[in-house]
Amino acid sequence: MFSNTNVFLLGETPQSSSHHLTTSSKTVGSAAVQLLTATADGNENYVSNAARQTANALKGFSNAARGVAATSSNPKLQNTIIDCAQLVMTMSSKLIIEVQKTISSPTNSLQRVMFLHSL
């Protein structure tokens, strides 16, 4: 549950936070696609770079979700934003774990990549 104490950064507005969340959401999606593509290719260097990009995108997404929640005066919206952001972070974590398993055990990599696409 999100507390009613809104802590937002100087210059942060509901509009700027919303825009940042929209942009960062697209960045997370793009990074996840790159991670899946790299995994399918089996190139460990490319996977490593894509995983780093995904982690950085998730950091921006987390900050943006915090900003939207902090600049809102609606407790229900605050909780919904935080809950949805937690779900994105959890699913992204699962994706990264599955990618690690796929790269470390290439014997079933095709099956695992198909599984990853289903997430």
Image (cartoon, rainbow, N blue to C red):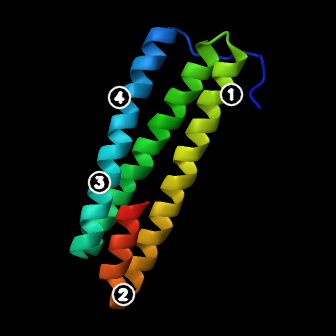
Residue 102 placement, left or right of 8? left
Alpha carbon separation for disc pair 3 and 4: 16 Å
Residue 12 placement, left or right of 35? right
Badge 4 density bin: few <14, some 14–19, many ≥20, Cα 10 Å: some
Percent across and percent down for residue 71 are 60, 13
Percent across and percent down for residue 76 are 69, 20
The kind of residue on which mark 1 rests is Asn
Alpha carbon separation for disc pair 2 and 1: 40 Å
The kind of residue on which mark 2 rests is Asn
Asked which secondary structure carries label 2, the reply is: helix
Residue drawn at (33%, 36%) of the image: 26
Residue 83 placement, left or right of 41? right
Residue identifier under label 4: 23
Marks 4 and 2, the one that precedes in the sequence: 4
Asked which secondary structure carries label 4, the reply is: helix
Residue drawn at (65%, 22%) of the image: 78
Say which of marks 4 and 2 sits in front: 2
CB-based contact (under 8 Å), mark 2 and mark 3: no
Alpha carbon separation for disc pair 4 and 1: 21 Å
The kind of residue on which mark 3 rests is Val
CB-based contact (under 8 Å), mark 3 and mark 1: no
Q: Quadrant of residue 42?
A: bottom left
Residue identifier under label 3: 33
Q: What is the quadrant of the C terminus in the image?
A: bottom left
Residue identifier under label 2: 108
